């Protein structure tokens, strides 16, 4: 809720901060995207004159609202910024990319995958660089980063590759996971999802375009449970032959067998208790 970040900042008095993004997640709690934005910028408000905030220039809400605050900003992102990442190449082994620090390029490799993971690496690298860490040390540290379980984690299974993104989900992450799945052009692509929670009265409206994107990219869209979330996703899928329903994630294995897909890539996007 609004005021919670401000309260934490009053306790901790941060000199530096990172604002990674703002999206529709937690609409049910905040009531509007405007309230979410004001809440997130409570961190920026707390930064003193002799500190700075690292902000994501790729995020429209962050970029536009930052202009209202007279703070020292360092902008990062995957766009045309002096702190960025370019030439991103993803494989089952991880990601190779060019890390841009203060407009200079450094070759990097990480075990992590996905645009959101690379954006977070750039954010952390920007902060580390601005606080005096040597670029070469940053590059070495990136090699050793371990992923958080169930966040865009590759899992090799018999006759399939699983992209496990079951830990949590928001609108931005949902889209990015699908775009990651699209990289596997020569293999059948499957998404398994119960949808995204905490979107309040906009649940149907937000899920419909996500369903369209899933239908455009995937050969099969498997929806878990009947809810406003999955109904919204289903509304967006024009080719209903791609659409499949299961009552529980426990039914997934049997359904995949009946689909008879050869060496598919299966994206697990969010996981919820069956009674949610």
Image (cartoon, helix red, strand yellow):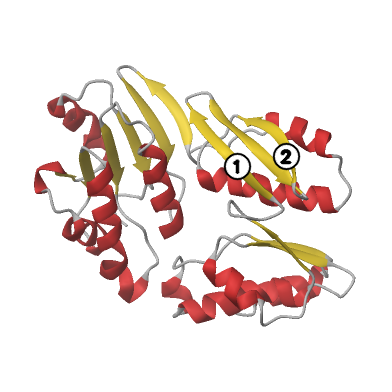
Residue with the mark numbered 2 = 105
SS for dot 1 = strand
Task: Using the image, determine if residue 93 lies above or below residue 46.
Answer: above
Task: Using the image, determine if residue 247 lies above or below residue 184.
Answer: below
User: Which residue corresponds to the image point at 15% horizontal and 42% vertical from the top-left?
Assistant: 242
Q: Is residue 163 visible?
A: yes
Mark 2 crowdedness (10 Å alpha carbons): few <14, some 14-19, many ≥20:
some
Residue with the mark numbered 1 = 86
SS for dot 2 = strand
Task: Using the image, determine if residue 7 lies above or below residue 180.
Answer: below
113 sits to left or right of 140? left
In three-dimensional space, the C-alpha distance between marks 2 and 1, rounded to whole angstroms, equals 9 Å
| Contact, mark 2 vs mark 1 (Cβ under 8 Å) | yes
Q: Position of residue 258 (x, y in %)?
A: 13, 27
Q: Which of the image's four quarters has the N terminus?
A: bottom right
Q: Is residue 1 visible?
A: no
Q: Position of residue 239 (x, y in %)?
A: 12, 48
């Amino acid at each position: 809720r609004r005021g919670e970040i401000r309260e934490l900042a009053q306790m901790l008095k941060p000199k530096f901060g990172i604002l990674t993004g703002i999206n529709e997640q937690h609409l049910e709690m905040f009531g509007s995207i405007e309230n979410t934005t004001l809440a997130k910028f409570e961190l920026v408000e707390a930064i003193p004159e002799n500190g700075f905030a690292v902000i994501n220039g790729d995020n429209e809400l962050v970029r536009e609202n930052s202009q209202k605050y007279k703070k020292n900003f360092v902008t990062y992102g995957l766009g045309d910024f002096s702190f960025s990442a370019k030439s991103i190449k993803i494989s089952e082994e991880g990601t190779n990319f060019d890390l841009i620090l203060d407009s200079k390029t450094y070759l990097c490799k990480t075990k992590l995958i996905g645009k959101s993971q690379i954006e977070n690496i750039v954010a952390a690298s920007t902060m580390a660089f601005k606080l005096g860490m040597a670029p070469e040390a940053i590059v070495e540290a990136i090699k050793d980063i371990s992923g958080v379980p169930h966040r865009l984690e590759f899992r090799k299974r018999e006759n399939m590759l699983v992209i496990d993104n079951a830990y949590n989900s928001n609108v931005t992450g949902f889209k990015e996971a699908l775009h990651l799945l699209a990289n596997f052009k020569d293999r059948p692509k499957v998404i398994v999802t119960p949808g995204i929670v905490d979107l309040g009265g906009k649940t149907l409206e937000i899920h419909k375009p996500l369903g369209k994107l899933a239908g455009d990219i995937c050969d099969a869209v498997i929806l878990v449970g009947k809810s406003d979330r999955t109904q919204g996703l289903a509304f967006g899928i024009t080719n209903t032959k791609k659409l499949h329903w299961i009552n529980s994630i426990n039914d997934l294995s049997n359904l995949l067998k009946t689909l008879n897909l050869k060496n598919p890539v299966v994206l697990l996007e969010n996981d919820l208790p069956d009674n949610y």
